[in-house]
Amino acid sequence: MATRSVDTPLSVVVLSWRGPGDPDAGGSELHAREILRRWVEMGVDVTVVTRRPPRSEDADAVAVPSEGLSVVHTGGTYSVFASAPARVLARGPRGDVTVEILNGVPFWSPLWRRRRSVVWLHHMHTEMWAQTLPRPMSDIGRWVESTIVPRAYGTPVVTLSHPGADELRHRGFRDVRVVEPGIAPRFLTAAPAVVDLGEPPRLVAVGRLAPVKRWIELLLAVEAMQAPGRPVLLDIVGGGPMRDEIDTWCRSRNAQWVTCHGVVSDARLVEIYQSATLVVSASSSEGWGMTITEAAACGVPAVVTDVVGHRGAVVDGHTGLLVPTPRDLTATVLALLDDRQRLGHMASTARERASSLSWEAAAATHLDIVRERVADGHR
């Protein structure tokens, strides 16, 4: 799809916990960056207001090279949720519309931008609160997110999948829209993965090394797949706070079937996907699971846990399989590896489905929602 330009000058202020280039950036930040850089190409003036990255003392506005985004750093990991609104209200920029990326802790933008705000919400955080904060803070955070936020956020809330939208409506959000994410062309143009029947099957798991991904449960599931003379290999790609714990686990179990690649280049990630038989995930919460559709674009089907976001990324039984728990990965993966005909059909179907996902289309639809809010603000 050709990139559309905006008809009149438009400025957008984006409130994000973690911004472009943040060392802890994950899937939410990747999604934002793909959308926002396309907005810039379409003539939109975009300013991202975000936390000061860890170990950084620079609180001035900076430009992200080659992407045209202006970035304002203010506050720290938690203080940013107060300092960012204060910074915008006191010093600007206000922008025509504020886009809030709601990642658990709110910026409360609908309360101070009224009809000029849009919210991007990938998923509710539920049990993630207990994984990241001690009690009673985790209990308070979960209560605020599930009870107060849906009532306060009457503004359009944009999420990634229809199952995710159903959950948000059930939680009490009133105006929920769906815009599916895209896939970078480097994955769509890559040669499809080719399974060598003479080599051990390779599973790949890509994502931030954080508790929500349930990495140890995934390792246990793949460990249970090992059999004499029939290893099942696992490639782990990504960085994060659990890296040392994963390395320690692998050493203690002599898990030579695991390769931890860390953070890799885009080209290397494509190569890893192309060498894989299946992409796997034991995650307990996802907004979508963009690594699943990246792998699908390379002709790699998925076996992943049945959580809301994965239901959008995987067409169960066609582009992959959903399983109830991480433990169920073991039998499901082994059965699929033994059914080469079904595996091949899923690989081709996954690649075909992935080809329908476009960042250009996603950016254009998101921009339509923003322009709708501009019109609402003039009424």
Image (spheres, rainbow, N blue to C red):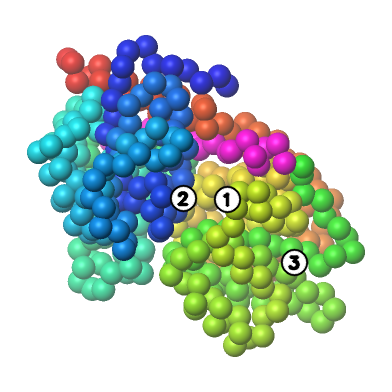
Alpha carbons under labels 3 and 2: distance apart: 28 Å
Q: Is label 3 in contact with label 1 (beta carbons under 8 Å)?
A: no
Q: Nearer the viewer, residue 24 or 115?
A: 24
- Which label was assigned to residue 334? 3
Mark 3 or mark 1, whichever is nearer to me: 1
- In primary-sequence order, the first of circles 3 and 1 is 1
Query: At 40% from the left edge and 58% from the top edge, which residue is drawn?
Result: 24
Q: Nearer the viewer, residue 38 or 364?
A: 38
* Res. 213 visible in picture: no
Helix, strand or loop for disc 2: helix
Query: At 18% from the left edge and 16% from the top edge, which residue is drawn?
Result: 378
Helix, strand or loop for disc 1: helix
Looking at numbered disc 1 in the image, what kind of residue is underneath it? Answer: Thr
Looking at numbered disc 2 in the image, what kind of residue is underneath it? Answer: Gly
Instruction: Find the residue positioned furthest to the left.
Output: 90
Q: Give the range drawn in magenta.
A: 171-190
Q: Is label 1 in contact with label 2 (beta carbons under 8 Å)?
A: yes
Mark 3 or mark 2, whichever is nearer to me: 2
Crowding near the residue tagged with mark 2, few <14, some 14–19, many ≥20 C-alpha atoms within 10 Å: some
Looking at numbered disc 3 in the image, what kind of residue is underneath it? Answer: Leu
Residue labelled with disc 2: 27
Image position of 336 (left or right of 113): right
Crowding near the residue tagged with mark 3, few <14, some 14–19, many ≥20 C-alpha atoms within 10 Å: some
Q: Is residue 235 above or below residue 25?
A: below
- In primary-sequence order, the first of circles 1 and 2 is 2
Query: At 28% from the left edge and 69% from the top edge, which residue is drawn?
Result: 133
Residue labelled with disc 1: 291
Helix, strand or loop for disc 3: helix
